[in-house]
Image (cartoon, rainbow, N blue to C red):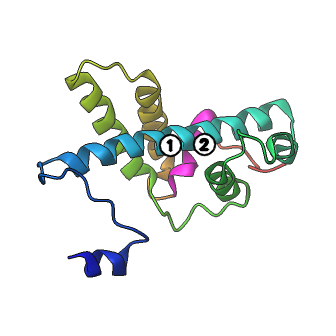
């Protein structure tokens, strides 16, 4: 099986030594929780930047090379700023579904995931606005009641 996985993925992570059912699914929910939160944070940061009239490049210059500088933040922000939300690498509709699953998993295990719940609402709102098939970075648009005329400054 390893050669097949190596052919289609950058690397394979084996979960659970005993092959326990659901181990990989639970790890996926945990990893996606971080990815979805980071994506929503990037979108909200750009939306606030736009609302306050701050050039997003000045924000990126301020965090450049420091512990808050993340390649993922820059990658998702570039999709928004350069209007390259299609084709999606991970669509808003899929992100909304996964966000709901994350919130439900937390509830089932007695954990309140307020950030994940707010993120699920953002993805659902972006989907209703017509961004369901675009990259999940399009949750940026959920920050506005109306579509902004420009995403970048």
Residue at figure coordinates x 61%, y 52% from the top left = 72
Callout 2: helix, strand or loop?
helix
First-in-chain label (1 vs 2): 1
Asked if the residues shown at circle 1 and circle 2 are in contact, with their CB atoms under 8 angstroms apart, the answer is: yes
Residue 95: x %, y % from top left = 41, 47
The residue segment tinted magenta is 135-143
Q: Give the residue number, with chain letter if any, for mark 1.
A: 126
Q: Main secondary structure of the magenta part?
A: helix
User: Between 96 and 62, which is closer to the camera in this rendering?
Assistant: 62
Check the image and report above or below for 128 versus 115.
Answer: below
Residue 121: x %, y % from top left = 44, 31
Image side of residue 122 versus residue 79, left or right: left
User: Between 152 and 109, which is closer to the camera in this rendering?
Assistant: 109
Check the image and report above or below for 97 versus 145.
Answer: below
User: Between 93 and 20, which is closer to the camera in this rendering?
Assistant: 20
Viewport quadrant of the N terminus: bottom left
Image side of residue 20 versus residue 40, left or right: left
Q: Is residue 145 visible?
A: no
Q: Is residue 138 magenta?
A: yes
Q: Is residue 70 magenta?
A: no
Residue 56: x %, y % from top left = 81, 44
Q: Residues within 10 Å of mark 1 (few under 14, many from 20)?
A: many
Residue at figure coordinates x 61%, y 34% from the top left = 143
Q: Is residue 74 visible?
A: yes
As drawn, the label of residue 47 is none
Count of marks, rendered view: 2
Mark 1–mark 2 distance (CA, rounded to whole Å): 6 Å
- Where residue 81 sits, quadrant-wise, is bottom right
Image side of residue 5 versus residue 120, left or right: left
Q: Residue furthest front?
A: 17
As drawn, the label of residue 141 is 2
Residue 7: x %, y % from top left = 35, 81
């Amino acid at each position: 099986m390893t050669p097949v996985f190596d052919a289609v993925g950058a690397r394979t992570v084996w979960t659970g030594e005993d092959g326990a059912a659901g181990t990989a699914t639970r790890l996926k929910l945990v990893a996606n929780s971080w990815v979805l939160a980071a994506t929503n944070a990037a979108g909200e940061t750009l939306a606030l930047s736009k609302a306050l009239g701050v050039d997003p490049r000045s924000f990126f210059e301020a965090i450049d090379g420091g512990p808050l500088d993340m390649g993922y933040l820059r990658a998702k922000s570039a999709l928004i700023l350069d209007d390259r939300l299609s084709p999606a690498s991970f669509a808003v509709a899929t992100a909304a579904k996964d966000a709901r699953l994350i919130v439900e998993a937390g509830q089932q295990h007695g954990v309140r995931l307020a950030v994940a719940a707010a993120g699920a609402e953002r993805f659902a709102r972006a989907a209703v606005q017509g961004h369901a098939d675009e990259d999940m970075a399009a949750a940026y648009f959920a920050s506005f009641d109306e579509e902004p005329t420009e995403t970048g400054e």
